[in-house]
Amino acid sequence: MFYHPLLRLAVVAASLSVMVGVAPAIAAAGGGNSDAAKACQKDGWQTLIRQDGTRFKNTGDCVSYKAQGGALIPAGHHFITFGEFPVGTLVTTQYASDGVIFSGTPGPFISQDAANPTSPVLSPGVGFSGTIEMEFVSPADVTTPASVSSVEFDVGFLNNLGGVTISTYDIAGNQIASFATNQLGIQHIILGGGIHRIRVVTTSDLAGAAIDNLGFSF
Ligand SMILES: [Ca+2]
């Protein structure tokens, strides 16, 4: 294939920008300060966030954060419908590469739910009564705690007001908020940034509840 010299330059530039886009994920998995500098340079800092969910102002901001021991988290949006695995799957680390780990009591699993139009859903356990915990981690490294810059999901089916309690925590373990559902049926929850962990307790609902359509951004 023949390129005009100017066109060839344009092709090389395009390839370089693709490489810059890929670099942060590699650097976030490990490496020292020079890797951090590479990951943060060009526009790399715009594709990364801090572990507490906040963004960088510029390259220097990003390099200095990494030099002080912070992990670089790849920015990006993730969306989970619980149709990704078979009904009956006990869910723990299956979505770790999306940046979320599930736990809870008696044990969150993918369930059919005749009361929910987007079934299957994530139920806290058989009978829909229990606790679902969501902990956010780096999509690049499951052992690196991270925080979302925004998160939303559906909770339901809600048979009585206040049946489900949702609590949020930051990366230091401090509670940010705790509130009860105030609708019937399916309630859409939208939460702000800096959240590392979410606890959903469904035991006060007459028939329990599940979550679905979990979307979040780092
Ligand atoms: Ca679903």
Image (spheres, rainbow, N blue to C red):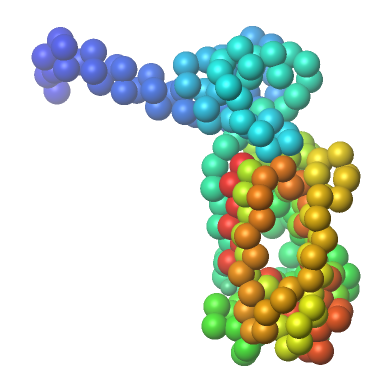
In the picture, measured across the screen, residue 87 lies left or right of residue 41, that is right
Which residue is at 34% across, 23% downward?
15
In the picture, measured across the screen, residue 81 lies left or right of residue 103, that is left
Which residue is at 66% across, 50% downward?
192
User: Whole-percent x and y of residue 84?
Assistant: 58, 65
Which residue is at 61% across, 69% downward?
188
Which residue is at 64% across, 84% downward?
185
Q: What quarter of the picture does the C terminus occupy? A: top right
Ligand 1 image-quadrant field? bottom right
User: Whole-percent x and y of residue 45?
Assistant: 55, 23
Q: Is residue 169 visible?
A: yes
User: Where 66 falls versus 211 (above or below)?
Assistant: above
For residue 194, which quarter of the picture?
top right
Q: How many marks?
A: 0
In the picture, measured across the screen, residue 55 lies left or right of residue 65, that is left
User: Whole-percent x and y of residue 77?
Assistant: 54, 48
Front-most of residues 161 and 135: 161
User: Whole-percent x and y of residue 165?
Assistant: 81, 70
In the picture, measured across the screen, residue 190 lies left or right of residue 171, that is left
Q: What quarter of the picture does the N terminus occupy? A: top left
Front-most of residues 111 and 182: 182
